[in-house]
Amino acid sequence: MGLKINNISGGYAGNNILKNISFDVPNGEIVALIGLNGAGKSTTVNHIIGELQPQMGSIVLNDTNIVSEPTAFKSQLAYIPEQPILYDELTLGEHLHLMLAAHEKDDENTWERVVSLLTMFRLEDKLNWLPIHFSKGMRQKVMLVSAFMLNAPLLIVDEPFLGLDTLAQRDVVSLMKEQAKLGNSILMTTHLLSSAASFVDRFVVLHDGKVRFVGTPSALAEENQLTVDHLDDLFDLMQKELANEG
Ligand SMILES: Nc1ncnc2c1ncn2[C@@H]1O[C@H](COP(=O)(O)OP(=O)(O)OP(=O)(O)O)[C@@H](O)[C@H]1O
């Protein structure tokens, strides 16, 4: 089980972007959605988080369909957007308690986990701070704590490394691996193919709103006659292809 995207087509009002997208994020797997700017990664994520509705196809998470049971679907989901969203008037502590309460998890056990995450990201002494006092990277770390504290069955992380120092990047990878070990599904978007290749189970390559490839990092490298260390060159190949099509 896990997340099953079956044959979805969709996009924005009057602007159809996704064409027959299908892929799975099985329980216990880390899957990276990749593609050039404008390929449709955010549009796909927006459908999975329920911001957009597909014109056709289905999105099912552990047997829960997003259309027939939207509340049950969303309660299984933790999402880390590329741009941090924080309530200006709430302290870090108030923000975390509010998020926990919304997921009915504001208990002592979960708070222990929150404290260990805050310590990992060196935020443990900042519970009384307001967002205005946080740097960009610190805001991103607050989003990471808010999502990882939930141990949600599906975690979606948009560009997990953006704005993070190398220590925090390493911590995010180990947290994603920990979530996978717990049997949760992780879907991330990234432009850093070679780095992602060292820890993701599979890549889903989007190209012009279509799924171009689904498979392991080594299979992706092999198909494009690249080594895993040089997977970033795939973007040059796709860019050239787009130029030829145009
Ligand atoms: N709000 C919107 N309304 C209409 N079209 C949009 C909107 N947002 C994005 N698009 C279009 O949808 C297509 C896919 O964009 P999307 O943001 O999904 O790409 P992406 O793969 O996430 O790119 P990036 O790597 O730049 O984040 C693009 O052609 C874009 O112009």
Image: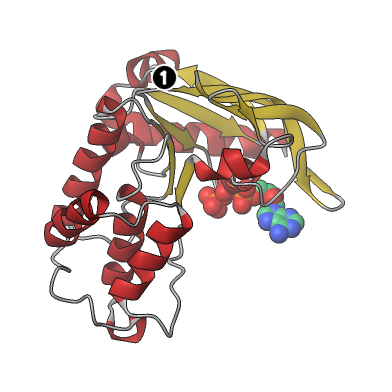
- The amino acid sitting under disc 1 is Leu
Name the quadrant containing residue 244: top right
Compared to residue 203, the image places residue 46 above or below, namely below
Q: Where is residue 165 in the image (x, y as percent from the top left)?
A: 19, 60
Query: How was the colour assigned to the protein in this rendering?
Result: secondary structure
Q: Is residue 138 above or below residue 88?
A: above
Residue 54 at x, y = what percent? Answer: 76, 38
Query: Camera-side residue: 208 or 115?
Result: 115
Left or right relative to 48: residue 77: left
Residue pictured at 40% horizontal, 50% vertical: 159
Residue 51, given in percent of the width and then of the height, sits at 67, 52
Q: How crowded is mark 1: few (under 14 residues within 10 Å), some or many (20 or more)?
A: many
The quarter of the displayed image where residue 7 is located: top right
What is the total number of numbered labels drawn onto the structure image? 1
Image quadrant in which the C terminus is located: top right
Residue hosting label 1: 220
| Left-right relation of 55 to 234 | right
- For image coordinates 35% across by 47% down, the residue present is 150
Q: Give percent across and percent down for residue 206.
A: 58, 33
Viewer-nearest residue: 114 or 205: 114
Residue occupying the far right of the picture: 14
Q: Looking at the image, can residue 27 be seen?
A: yes
Name which residue lies at 52% across and 38% down: 35
Say which of 162 and 127 sits in front. Answer: 127
Name the residue rendered at 46%, 64% in the picture: 83
